[in-house]
Image (cartoon, rainbow, N blue to C red):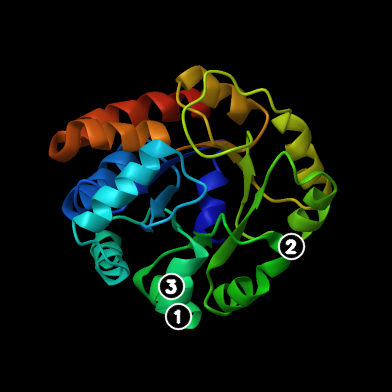
Amino acid sequence: MSNIARAFEKGKAFIPFLTCGDPSLEVTEQLVYAMAEAGADLIELGVPFSDPTAEGPVIQAANERALAGGVTTDKIFDMVERIRKNCQIPMVFMTYANVVFSYGIERFAQRAAQVGMDGLILPDVPFEEKEEFSEICKDNGLAFVSLIAPTSHNRITQIAREADGFVYCVSSLGVTGVRSNITTDVGAMVRLVKAAKDIPCAIGFGISRPEQAAAMAAVSDGAIVGSAIVKLCGQYKEGCVPYVKEYVREMAEAVHKA
């Protein structure tokens, strides 16, 4: 069983997201341990990029802070290597095609696999153009995680058939961020995926409160939360670990009960 499959084997998975290096890579490492202890099932590590098109203002600002602080892809790989000596929680990178492309696709995939990452999410790579990344990921034992959005409609079945690891269901149009209401019929999206392939589906974009996370997990296999966590990192900076840990505990409990 893959490490990603293990994240979903107990039922519903809670998946928090962090921007690596905000406020520092040392704090990011501590946050991973704290979130694993608090009940997270899989962690998304954001590799900062100067133009993160799918992100709202909260994660964009975190990307800028991390890059200004001198974070590089190599330093993130070194951090993952340290984490893997202490913690085996499933982890996937989320970043942009440009980051992987400029590092070298093959070199990136090899290094990611070597340090113990389980997968890669590139929100700006359309399904039709994924092969130059997905094939190399597969060769290195990394899941190339597909996204489906409310606009995917008749492509959902096709995307699901070729999906690997889990499917990231985008709950709403636009960029990441906290939303008061999620109106998309995500349950219908999940049903279409499941009809095409038996693969876990987790829902992200806009989830910030336990009741939202529980509602999303009730119609899928898990909930993904980014902006609300990154906001806490921005607010409490070097002192953010206990606040994030408490938040993740509340959210994970809500998801696991769904």
Q: Which mark is residue 113?
A: 3
Quadrant including the C terminus = top right
Marking on residue 1: none
| Separation (CA) of disc 1 from disc 3 | 14 Å
Residue 226 seen by the camera? no
Quarter assignment of residue 226: top left
Residue 209 higher or lower than 134, as above or below: above
- Residue 162's label in the rendered image is 2
Q: Residues within 10 Å of mark 3 (few under 14, many from 20)?
A: some
The percent position of residue 180, horizontal first and vertical second, equals 52, 18
In percent of width and height, residue 149 lies at: 68, 43
Of pointers 3 and 2, the one earlier in the residue sequence: 3
Is residue 211 or residue 9 the one in the foreground? 211
**Amino acid type at image mark 1:** Gly
What amino acid is found at the position of numbered circle 2 in the picture?
Glu
Q: Is residue 243 left or right of residue 167?
A: left
Q: Taking 222 as reference, is 36 left or right? A: left
Viewer-side residue, 53 vs 33: 53
Does 67 appear above or below 227?
below
In the image, what residue occupies the spot 74% across and 50% down?
198
Image quadrant containing the N terminus:
bottom right
